[in-house]
Image (cartoon, helix red, strand yellow):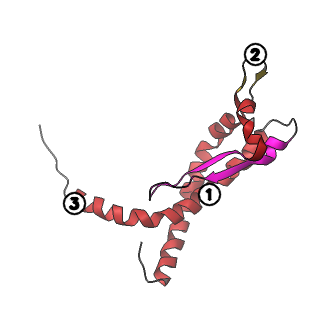
Amino acid sequence: MAYKYVSGVREVRENFKKIKNGLDVPMRTTLQKAARPVVSVAKKNAPKESGVLRKSLKMFRVPRLPSGYVEYRIGASGKARLYAHLAEWGRFGHYAGTRFMTRTFDSEAQPTIQRFKALWPAELEKRIKYLATKGRTL
């Protein structure tokens, strides 16, 4: 049995830890731009009874994550958040849910990833130029 060794892994890990902190801003803006169409599709798929749920759908940034992590959530705000789960999943014996968010995420997962891939290099380049004007590096 032949063994193969890769040298320099420790140095790569240390360097990645250094740049990981600088990637938060471009990742956040890229993810926000890539996920914005998901909100509009969710609004189109939402049940149309009163329109309150449809109007309340928003994208929220998840606070207090460790450095290097970026997360957004899409959901209802205001009073609609109290019954949004019923519109999605329904209530046993009374109301069949519409699964509007599930359908939205299923249909928009790959397009969002493709949008992120397309937007990421430009946002990263923009951040590098900004840091260069401040005399810092990524």
Residue at the image point whose x is 58% and y is 56% from the top = 31
Q: Which amino acid does label 2 sit on?
A: Gly
- Magenta stretch encompasses residue 28: no
- Magenta stretch encompasses residue 74: yes
The region drawn magenta spans 51-77
Q: Name the residue under label 2.
A: 93
Q: Earlier in the sequence, mark 3 or mark 2?
A: 3
Residue 128 or residue 50, whichever sits in front: 50
Look at the numbered disc 2 and give the secondary structure of its residue: loop
Q: Earlier in the sequence, mark 3 or mark 1?
A: 3
Numbered mark located on residue 32 in the image: 1
Question: Image quadrant for the N terminus?
Answer: top left
Q: At which x and y percent is residue 138? A: 42, 71
Residue 116 or residue 52, whichever sits in front: 52
Label 1: few (<14), some (14–19) or many (≥20) C-alpha neighbours in 10 Å: some
Numbered mark located on residue 88 in the image: none
Q: Can residue 83 be seen in this view?
A: yes
Q: Distance between the residues labelled 2 and 1?
A: 38 Å
Q: At which x and y percent is residue 17? A: 34, 61
Look at the numbered disc 1 and give the secondary structure of its residue: helix
Q: Can residue 121 be seen in this view?
A: no
Q: Mark 3 points at which residue?
A: 8
Q: Distance between the residues labelled 3 and 1?
A: 35 Å
Give the quadrant of residue 14: bottom left
